[in-house]
Structures are given as C-alpha cells and as structure tokens.
Image: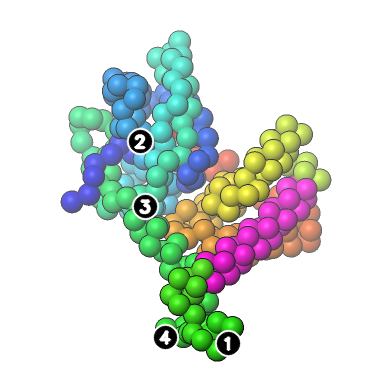
Amino acid sequence: MGELIPLFPLGTPLFPGVVLPLHVFEPRYRRLVDDLQALPEDSERRFFGVVAIRQGWEVERVAPAEALYDVGCTARLQMVRPQADGGFRVVTVGGDRFRLLDVVVADDPPYLQGEVEWLADEEAAEEAAADTEGLVLPGAGIAAPGGVPACDDELDEVVSSVARDSLAVLAQGVQDLFSDYVGEVAELGAGSGGEDAERAALLAAVADDPVALSWLVASAALLTTEDRQALLAESTTRRRLAAESRLLRRELTLLQTIGAVPVPLQRFATPMTVN
C-alpha cells in the first residue's frame, strides 16, 4: 500500500522547484485548500499532488486512473489569498516526485486522492548508476603511473571527476540551446518582454545547478504535455538533460523552418477550468 495524498489534476505537469499559482474556485478544491489550511503552518502535510491529465479535458468523463499520468509532483502551499466569491488565489511550489498507484474517489473528502509511492530513493539510485554509465566496464582497472593498478579510492575519484565534467558539458549545451530557443520565441512575438527577462534571470540563477536547469527547461519550453511528462518521469538529471537537448534542437529547427510557435491544445478546450 502506498501513501494517500490529495490530488489536483491539471492540463500540464508540475516540476520540482517550479512556482505554480492557481485560482481555486470549484467547491471540492475549495475544501482541499480549507483542509490544508487547517493543518499547522509548519506541517509537512500542507501539500497536494499535481498530476497531468492524459485523456480529455475533464477527468470525470473517463475513469480517473485512466485519465491521469502515473508520475506527478507535489505542490507545497506557500500562500493563500481568499477571494470574495469564496474561492482562493494560491501560490505553490513543486516539491517531490511520486508514482500514482491508484486513484481514490469518495464523497468525503470530495476531491480525488491518490495512493502514491515516492520516487526519491529510485531517483538517487538512478542518478548514481547514470553517473558511471558508459564510463567504467565491469572488472576494468585503471593503472596508476608506473603500471601499478589504481586503488579503489583513486578509481572512484577518476570516475567521479569524469562524470562531473561530462555532466557540466551537457548542462552547458542545454543552457546554450535554451538561450537560443528563448531568443527565437521572442523574435516570433510569442513572449512578452517581462517573460523573456524573467526567463533570462532564472537561467542565470540555475547556470551552475544542472538539476535546477533541467527542471527550468522542462517547465518553460513550449513542449507538448507528452514531452513534458516524459521529462518529469525521467529520474536522472543526465538523461533528462540529454532528452532536453534533443527536444530543443527539434523545436529550434521547427521555429526556424516554419516560423511559428506551437500553441498548447488546452487553449482550444471549452469550457476551460484549472480545477
């Protein structure tokens, strides 16, 4: 059995460290915000799980477990501002990734709940494996000067150094591609000056943090829900950055060839709801 947490389906995934403002107006999600506010301010439980909708525009039109992607991210409550109509303006920030095992539908509470398993341990193991992937063969040894085989500590340091350097090169490549991508989008008039300046500031802030860079690119690039979901589901920073490198090259080619910025399909859905 996994842990039971509140769910908030959205049209696109949320990523760790990314700020997510929401306008909460449906009664069931007003109840969710009320329940979270009833917890102590320092409670670790003041969060809900954001999961992207896989099918259709409304989860209730199909079975919830089939309508939602199976990897999501928690949204930790940062600010709540009550509205005159009884709704809320809330600000959340992406927290931990989880795998959705099952969806629980009940009358009380009225909002969806998910049985989940947390992906932190899986992510740590995958990161460690990815760092040495392709760098060391089983049973291989590295000779120190003079022909004496290197000790385990020396070998570990060599592997760690090569892994760090190769990840830094990969991250720099993604950063350069993303800068070019933002420039192309700006030239096509798809972003305001304020948005462009904000992206540039964020990019500078995460320049030395490959993990944060990978989540920034995943959240800010105009990708399909499927592409974004695949990036969220990827547990290793190295492979996530490699995927983003391929996606950004593809998007840059399309921007430069077609001269148009893709519009998310959700924009054409009617009626629209963030709940």
Cα–Cα span, label 1 and label 3: 43 Å
The residue pinned by badge 1 equals 146
Q: Could you say which disc has been placed on residue 48 in the image?
A: 2
First in sequence, mark 3 or 2: give its number.
2
Residue situated in front as seen by the camera: 204 or 60:
204
Disc 4: which residue = 139
Percent position (x, y) of residue 229?
Answer: 48, 54
Q: Which of marks 2 and 4 is in front?
A: 4
Residue 12 picture location, percent across and down? 49, 45
Tell me the residue that label 3 is attached to.
120
Q: Do the residues labelled 2 and 1 touch (CB within 8 Å)?
A: no
Give the residue furthest to the front.
146
Q: Of callouts 2 and 4, which one flags the residue occurring earlier in the amino acid sequence?
A: 2
Q: What element carries label 2?
A: strand
Q: Where is the C terminus found, in terms of image quarters?
A: top left
Q: Are marks 2 and 4 in contact (CB under 8 Å)?
A: no
